[in-house]
Each structure stands twice: as C-alpha cells, then as structure tokens.
Amino acid sequence: MQQDSVRREDEAPNLGGLDGLVPQPFSRRGFVMTSLITGLTLATPRVEAQVIRTDAEGIEAGEVKIPAADGPMPGYYAVPKGEGPFPVILVIEEIFGVHDYIKDICRRLAKAGYCAVAPELYARQGDLSTMTDVKQIVAEVIAKTPDAQWIGDLDAAAAWAASASRGDLSRLGAMGWCRGGRGAWLYAAHRADLKAAVAWYGPLGGERTPIQPRTAGDVAPEIQAPLLALYGGADSGIPVASVEEARDKARAASRSVELVVYPEAPHGFHADYRPSYRKAAAEDGWAKALAFLKAHGVA
C-alpha cells in the first residue's frame, strides 16, 4: 500500500456517540508530533535483552498519516498481505507514545490475521519522543488531552482502516495498555458497533476534570461491547478491588466483563521492554485476548 494514498483530509469523525461521556464542544489544536517515535521510549527503564521483535514477513506494516478533523495524524498500521477485508483492532497506546513496543504489537496482531491501527493520540499535546520524565508526560500531555479528542481520533483511525487498509468494521475490536486500558473501557462505552475490547491493566479511577469528566469505573455500566480485563494482583497503582467493583457494576447493568487477575504480576506485565515484564502472564494474557476477540466476532 502506498502511504500517499491515505493522506486525505475528509470529513471530521462523527462524535455523536460521545453524548454523556464528554462535554461538547471541545477545541482542537495543531499537531506537535508529525511523525512517530523511532525506537523505544526514553521515559522508562528498558531491558533490551527481553524485547520481542516481530518481523514483517507475510504482512504490510509502516507509519501512515490518518485523516483527522484537523489534519493528518501520525499512526502505525500492520495488516496481512492479501485482499481482505480483515477484522480491525484499534491499538490504544500507553502514555509513552506509539514507539517500537506498540508498533510490534500491531505486527503481532497482523500475523494473527488482523488489520491493526495505532494512532498517535497525544500528537497535539506534546512531543513524546523527547520526554524522559513520566511526571512531565502526565502533567503536560496526558492531563491535557481531552477524552473527546482521542475518542474521535480512534473513530478516525477505524474509518481509515476501512477505506485505506482493507479493514472490515463489522468486525471491530479495541485493545489498550495502561492508560490505553482506561481507553478500552471508555471506547467500549462510546461505540455501539464495537464487537469486543481488551483492557490491559487500565486504571479505573482517577481525577475527573472538565476535559476528562468520567473514569473508566464510571462508564463500566455503559459499555456496549464485551470486555476482557487483564490485571496484575501485584499492581501497586490499581487495586484489584477497584477492577472487581467495575466488573460488578457492569454485570449489574447486564454488561459483559470477564476479569483475569495474575496474582504475582505488577503493572505493565505485558510490556516486554520494561523490568515489569512477566513472560508467563504476558503470554497467557495474549492468548486469552486473541481467543476473546475471536469468540465475540472479531476474527
């Protein structure tokens, strides 16, 4: 696929489904990041020896420009070779940007038969390729990114996948890690045609602000797709009780949440480039995630 073929600036994504989730209207700003991070993030300790590197044999993969409401948004895609159409997975990044770990996840998904797309959701708020301080990222980027903005960007990425990369939106799923795990909960509450979502250790609580008015726990009773929640029992920042509470709220509203807790796993147990990586939990969670997507029509 030629990248030039996807550099269109068409209609803004429909945000009508955000009613009750985010305030309207919201403002857009120009892009600070116009391309993705090269290599791994500089903002956290790394263990290079355990990094998983997935090749591109049998797939197409690379950086693209995704038409958003205010211009081309950088992103990464991976899709099997062939005509398709293929089921679509929206890959929701951690707080560190679409760096090599997120890109590799896209390639892993493509090897499993998916059209995977990871938009750089923080491209307007700051240049994550230059940031080395987690507190700076949280204060200057994460806290200043409106939920309406990144949800609209995921919608735009889904539309791009269907139009430019042989994706089938009748088989649409979402998968997110850390802050992206929170995103999986919120996106499942936003999008009625989402078939399934997977949240890897996404926070359920947090501060409510005018631009981020609801937590993942708040929207748990409103999710519109089955959700698989993968969490670590040794996660010091996300009490298992908070995840169980969200699950129970969802089930009380007749929503489907399947919770898997790995008792000894810390936060970030799937992040193979970090000291928090736990191979057994990561591999088991990945297998469960793929089986969950398939069971709910994303295959």
Image (spheres, rainbow, N blue to C red):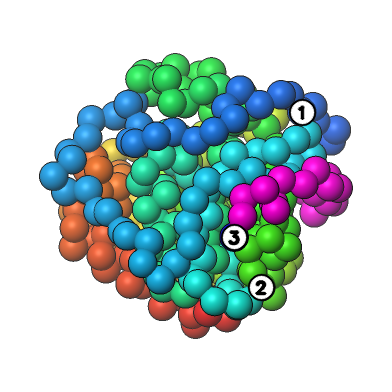
Identify the residue shown where x is 34% and y is 26%.
Answer: 43
| Cβ atoms under marks 3 and 1 closer than 8 Å | no
Identify the residue shown where x is 38% and y is 23%.
Answer: 134
Total labels: the figure holds 3
Identify the residue shown where x is 30% and y is 47%.
Answer: 271
Q: Residue 257 — which label? A: none
Crowding at mark 1 (Cα within 10 Å: few <14, some 14-19, many 20+):
few
Crowding at mark 3 (Cα within 10 Å: few <14, some 14-19, many 20+):
few
Q: Quadrant of the N terminus?
A: bottom right
- Magenta segment boundaries in residue numbering: 2-21
Asked if residue 64 lies left or right of residue 287, the reply is right
Relative height, residue 154 to residue 133 (above, below): below
Q: Nearer the viewer, mark 3 or mark 1?
A: 3
Percent from the top left, x then y, of residue 253? 64, 67
Asked if residue 106 lies left or right of residue 101, the reply is right
**Residue at the left extreme?**
49
Q: Is residue 58 magenta?
A: no
Identify the residue shown where x is 69% and y is 51%.
Answer: 6
- Could you tell me the amino acid type at mark 3? Met
Dominant SS in magenta:
loop
Q: Residue 168 — which label? A: 2
Q: Nearer the viewer, residue 62 or 223?
A: 62
Q: Nearer the viewer, mark 1 or mark 2?
A: 2
Q: Which residue is mark 1?
A: 28
Sequence-first disc among 3 and 1: 3
Q: Which residue is mark 3?
A: 1
Give the Cα distance between marks 2 and 3. 17 Å
Mark 1 residue element: loop
